[in-house]
Image: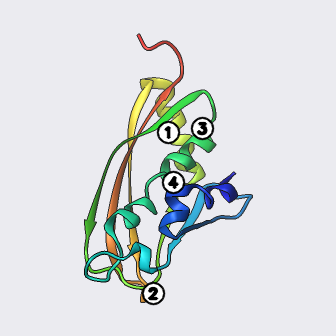
Amino acid sequence: MLKLVNWYPPLWGAGIKVSHKKSDINNIHVELKQHWWNKNYIGTHFGGSMYAMCDPFYMVILSRNLGTDYIVVDQGASIKFLRPGIGKLRAHFYISPQEIETIKNKLAKIKKSTEEYTTHILDDQNRPVAEVHKQIYVRKRGRLR
């Protein structure tokens, strides 16, 4: 499934490449190479492309692990730029199997939850370029009332 995400126009058009091991959907790596079409006015990475490289992946990990009995959607996000992004950037997204089980157990009791995650976008020298916070809304499927 994630092999096809590299052809998704908003990611492909921004120059974003997604990789993961087929057997490990909990571990997603994303790269953003700098090109003329994803630079901003001053020659650094366009902030929208940096955010796009982080947008769907925590939601994807949760959706794939929790299955169709759950609704999983992005609820909120923020990005804090720490330094100019230049060259190849990368980000890593991971949710442990233990955390997935904790979420399932929590949802058996409270029915809905907002899960929060933070990741850093790193440059070639392993320096943080941006910090991205995501809030993911999760609930059991069923009647809305």
Type of amino acid at the residue the image marks with label 2? Asp
Residue indicated by mark 2: 124
- Give the crowd class for mark 3: few <14, some 14-19, many >=20 residues within 10 Å: some
Q: In front: 74, or 5? A: 5
- 102 relative to 134 in the view: left or right: right
Q: Nearer the viewer, mark 1 or mark 2?
A: 2
Label 3, secondary structure: give it: helix
Residue indicated by mark 3: 66
Give the residue at the far bottom of this rendering.
125
Picture coordinates of residue 78, whole percent (x, y): 28, 55
Disc number placed over residue 103 in the picture, else none = 1
Q: Nearer the viewer, mark 4 or mark 3?
A: 4
> Image height check: is 11 above or below 66?
below
Mark 1 and mark 3 lie on one chain; the one further toward the N terminus is: 3
Type of amino acid at the residue the image marks with label 1? Ile
Picture coordinates of residue 123, whole percent (x, y): 41, 82
- Give the crowd class for mark 1: few <14, some 14-19, many >=20 residues within 10 Å: some
Q: Nearer the viewer, mark 1 or mark 3?
A: 3
Query: How far is mark 1 from mark 3, CA to CA?
Result: 9 Å
Mark 3 and mark 2 lie on one chain; the one further toward the N terminus is: 3
Residue indicated by mark 4: 57
Mark 4 and mark 3 lie on one chain; the one further toward the N terminus is: 4
Picture coordinates of residue 106, whole percent (x, y): 46, 33
Query: How far is mark 4 from mark 3, CA to CA?
Result: 14 Å
Query: How far is mark 1 from mark 4, CA to CA?
Result: 17 Å
Q: In front: 71, or 42? A: 42
> Image height check: is 23 above or below 82?
above
Choose top left, top right, bottom left or bottom right for residue 64: top right
Please report the residue visible at 58 percent of the width from the left and 62 percent of the height from the top. 28
Mark 4 and mark 2 lie on one chain; the one further toward the N terminus is: 4
Disc number placed over residue 122 in the picture, else none = none
